[in-house]
Each structure stands twice: as structure tokens, then as C-alpha cells.
Image (cartoon, grey):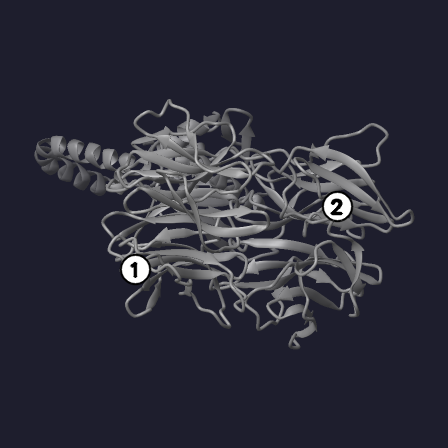
Amino acid sequence: MLETKQSVFFLGSCRIDASDNSLLFPASADCAQERITLQPKFVEVLAYLAHQYPRVVTREALINDIWEGNTYVGEKALTNAVWHLRQQLGPLGAGEVIETVRKTGYRLCIEPRFELPAEDGQLRLERKSRLLGWALLGCSLTLAVVLAVAGHHWYKDTLHRPFGVDRLTSDGGSERFPSVSPDGRFLVYGGQQPGKNGSLFQLDLEHPDASPRQLTPDSSDELRAVWSNDGKSLYFPSASGGECKITRLDLKDGRLTPLANCTSVTTAIDLTADGTSLAFITTNAPQKNAGIYLLDLTGEEAEPVRLSCDTECPYRDRDFAFSPDGQTLAIARRFGDISEDIFLRHLADGSERRLTQGIEDIRGLSWHRDGRRLVYSTEEAGNRGGYLIDTDTGEITSLDQDGLSYPRFVPDSDELVFYHYNNHRQLVTMHPFAKVPQAPFPMIYGNFSQRYADYSPEAGRLVFVSNESEHNEIWTSDVDGQRRQMHTSLKRQATSPAWSHDGSRIAFVAADTNHEGNKLHILDIRDNSIRVVASPYINHGRPEWSGDDSFLLASTVDGLTRFHLDNKPPTLVSSIMVRRLQVLGDWLYFSYSTGPRGLWRMPWQGGKPEQVLGAKLMSDGYNWTVSDDGVFFRQRHSGSALLSYFDFARAEVRPLIELPPNSISRQENMVWVEKEQKLVLVSWNYPRRDVMRLRHPALH
């Protein structure tokens, strides 16, 4: 490794000391002396570039030297390090401090001046004496040290690099939620083509080149299953004819038996360790939140019994897994809409303890056969990865497997099956009324996601959420995606920004500091200050400003709620539950989250709702935006995404463009830029998901 740890050098007036990872800026007429402490890796990158000045340093060289060749971590960490260094070295005012050389690497643009420590004669004599005294001992220990270092590096490499990843499916569609039979021979997974129902498929792992066997018909929808302990049956949620049923499939004769009601074909499902009870997540009246229910499989007339909190719950359970000894339930629990963590529940007495803190999204969890360790997948700022946690000590080990989703251990094995998923959302633009039909064009190129766009005619800028800094933060740009600026550095998930009508402030939702819900925030664009809106609620829907910018509107557990800007307690406007809001003129346009579909409106001061578009035309709760003359929306259409326009004056619908299914994200809104006569949307590519098998030494 290049020796950089003891380097002290100057870039312009800034003194960099790698021994304590500090940057020291001298005092000036405008500001006092400033000392900044950086992460050690950031300083190592800067010192490496300084030692190589003026040469270009490749990304591979930096990753090999500083991250010991661990490309899984190094690729993103290096980008993050360079971004932060540019931010911190900005006061030098010397233009670009670190230059990106396209398709190669980086080059330092300021010549470094190295500070060499002075050494007098007495010190040199003492050093030589020590060296002579150590020479004999050093020779005898050299071999041992070399072996120890080699062993240490081998151990670190084995922890950070998978022993092997095998692709088990490659059907070209979406294969999800893998599960291996108790004898380890058969893989069951949900397979789906764009715009079609999902079906369960079975693959013989002893003959992986053979075609998978389809277990459920195309007429119904299934994606996620769990094996019975004897391997003779499967349990899964199945949707058909508008109903969802937890179903048992006897593999020998193909008989299907409905067992209980459910709400989603992707709902979590698992068997107790003894195989006598089936647990799944659903919503049953009168409970509002989805929760875990337990169904006794030994009784013919048994009814599901709720295990989760059922009244006034500040959270909802989203996924779970039974420990091998059947004594503990690991639960992925969501607080609000943007914060989720793992809890352990002791089934004998119902006691619980929190295992993780501050995760955005959990995408599956599975117990190791030792009953002590747990593997789980997270999605942070749009990126998925897997982790191993020791439930006794809390120690977390990254599996460094990009895209790892919904892991499940192979029975009686240290191997995992999972499906690989990575997909970035992207801001795109189109001119819907152009004479020549136009497909959406990307606005911002790069390997980052952009979401939740809004536009202010007064500010002349877009606001959106981007993960460019490795966290979902609030950014703005001009209408073409240029002159981008990051406005927050919360380092926790921010979402759903909305411009005030005067273009001076942006309301948004972000996870609270305890990661037990979210809070409404207001960013003042004039000085970049941020404040939290007073609220007793732990969860807030997407915010919108009143027509006069005097208060905020957002959905809560009580309904549509008004949030005052002077710290007064919020007041309930209506008990209606809404997904998305937009104020235009005197009207508040909205879509229900629980209630009739379509687009509705009422005066933003409060009043009686009236329907604008019916459910037969518009079924999406987010994919719409209102202009002075009409409504842009995604129309209900089979097998594709059809963007349409409802003209207020003519009271008629005009189809605009037909796009591939799922090419426009269902969770995003559209934005109409009147001056440019263009729509801004959030696009994504239909993700290919393949089932993989992982062998990793950390799992041994």
C-alpha cells in the first residue's frame, strides 16, 4: 500500500494532516481559523492523489490500494469520497480541486507542498541505535509477520468477497421470492412477465438445465410461497376474481385448498418451526394496520388469530421469520412510511427488543440454522444489499452482494437463495402536444436515481429527491435538469418535496432522528434553513401548501390534516384518507387512499368533495397532475402504460402516448411545466430479477 498515513501537506492555504484526518484552513478577514475532521478513507484518497500529482490515478488503483481491491464497497465509497472532498475543499476557490478524467479516474489540480518533519543529529543517532538493536529480532520475526499479514488479508478478502454466486434462473422476466424444499432439491419461485399475472414455478436443482414446471395457472396471480415441513405442500397467497386467499397446494395431485383471506400476493408468509401453524400478514376489520396472523393448521374450522398490535399502533409489521427453535419471531416493523427496523419477539411471553436502528427499507429476512444469526436485505437510497447480524451481540457484517433481495437459507445449509434486483428511477421529459409524437427523454444522465419531482413557476426550478450523495436528499435544478444544487444533508431519507406557491419554500417529509416515524420539514430556499413543523403524529403523507401558503395539508392517521406554521396544534380538515394532493387556484385536487378511486376536488379551505375523473378512467393514486386547462394522468389500460389528457373545456379524454408496462413508476407524480409546454415524469425500466444462490464464508 502507498504510504500516506503520516503525510502532512498543503493544498493552497489548506493544511492536510493524515495523522488525525484533518483539514486546517487559516484565519482570514472574513472568518476565523477552521479545522475540519474527515473520514480516514477520504483523507487517504486525497493523500494518494497528492503523492501521484500531476498524474491521473485510475479508479482501480485507488480501490486496490485504499479498499484492498474490494470493488463491492470501493466503487460507491470512492465516488462518495471524491464528492465530499470537493465539498470540503471548496473554500480554496481554485476552481476544480479534483478533476474527473472520463473513463479513467481522477487527478489533483492543485500542486501539493509536502511538510517534512525536521530531525536533529541526536535523534538520528538514537534511531540508528534502535534499528541495530531491533535488527536481529526483526529478522527472526519477518517470516511470522509475513504469514500473519497474508493470513489477515486472506481473511478480510474472504469476508468481503463472496465465495460463489450462481444464477439459478434466467427466464428474461421477473423471478422473485425463492424458497428451497426441505430436502434441498427443488426451488420454488414466483415468475412474472411485464403486464401479466405471476405464477409459481418449480425448478429441479439436480437438473438446473431442465425447464421449470409451472405450478399455478395464468388465470390467477401468485408470487410468494413457503414449503410445508414434509415438502409435500406449498402455502401461498393467491389472487383471482378480485379476491385474495391464503391457499395450500398439494404437489402430488395439484389440489388447491383456500384457507383464509389475504390482501396481497406478495404478503409475508412463514410456517412455525413445528409446521403446525401458518403465519401471514394481512388486514382484517376492524384493524386499520396490516399485521401478523397465526392460523392453526391442525383444526379444520380454525380462524386466524392476530399476533401484532391491533389498536392505536404506532407501527405496522411488514415481514417476519420464525427462528429454527420456534421460540423467537424476527419482525421487520415500519414506523411511518420511510423508516423500518428489525425487532425480536419472544413468543413465550410476548417480550420484544429492538435489533437494528435507522434502516429505510427491509427487503426480506431469514434465520441461519444456528438460530443466533439473521440475514436481512435493506434498500437504502435506492440501493439494495444484504447483511448478517448476530442477534446476541448486535454485530453486523455486510455480505457485499449488490442487489441482494429477499434472502432465504437453503434448509440444513449455510447457502442462501435470493433474487437480484437493482433499478434506478430517472426524471424524463416529453412534450405531449408536439406535432411529432415524442417518447420521454432523460433529463439527468448518470447512475443515480431521481424521484418525487415538483416545479415552481415563480422560482423557475424543479425540486426532486436524488441519491447522488448516497443518501436521499433534496435537490433543485432548472427545467432542463441543469444547474443542480443539493439543499439538504440530513443523511436520512427525505421524500415528497412540494414548492410553496411563491417559490420561496419547499415542504418535504423526512425520517425523524430516532427513526421511529417521519416529520414534516420546511426548507427556506432563500437561506437554506430547515425547520420541523409541530406535529404529534409519527407519520405524515405527501404535503401540499394551501393556496395562500399559510399552512400545509397532509394525510395522517386521522385523515386530511392542516398543519400550521406558527407551532399551533394541527387541525383536522376531513376524515378522508388521501394519497396525493395538489392545490391549483381555489381547488384542492386529490386521490383517495381508502375510498373511491379516480380524481376528486374540493375548495382548499375545506368543503364537500366532487369527482373530476371516474375510476374507470383513472385508477392510479399518484400518476396525475392538474393544469389550468386539464388533467394529465395515466389511464387505466391493459398491458401498457397509457398517458392521457382530460380537457376541462371539452370534457373529453385525449390519449397522448402508449408506453411499455411499468415504464412509468406507479409511486411517482407528474409535473406540468406550462411555460415549456412539457411534462416531467419519473421513469424506470421493468427490472429483470433473477434467482441467485450465494456461498459466503461469513455464513459458515
Q: Are marks 1 and 2 in contact (CB under 8 Å)?
A: no
Q: Secondary structure at mark 2?
A: strand
Near-viewer residue (260 or 153): 260
Q: Residue lying furthest bottom in this view?
A: 568
User: Seen in the image, is 508 located left or right of residue 434?
Assistant: left
**Residue 28 seen:** no
Name the quadrant containing residue 447: top right
Which image quarter is the C terminus in?
A: top left
**Residue 184 seen:** yes
Residue 328 circle label: 1
In the image, residue 504 sits, relative to residue 70, either above or below, namely below
Neighbours of disc 2 within 10 Å: few (<14), some (14-19), many (20+) = many
Residue 610 rendering spot, x and y as whole percentages: 80, 62
In the image, residue 531 sits, relative to residue 252, either above or below, namely below
In the image, residue 7 sits, relative to residue 651, either above or below, namely above
Q: How far apart are labels 1 and 2 at the CA level? A: 46 Å
Residue 340 rendering spot, x and y as whole percentages: 46, 57
Neighbours of disc 1 within 10 Å: few (<14), some (14-19), many (20+) = some
Q: Residue lying furthest right in this view?
A: 649
Residue 391 circle label: none
In the image, residue 331 sits, relative to residue 239, either above or below, namely below
> Residue beneath label 2, please?
633
Near-viewer residue (195 or 533): 195
The amino acid at mark 1 is: Thr
The amino acid at mark 2 is: Phe
Q: Secondary structure at mark 1?
A: strand
Mark 1 and mark 2 lie on one chain; the one further toward the N terminus is 1
User: Seen in the image, is 507 located left or right of residue 353?
Assistant: right
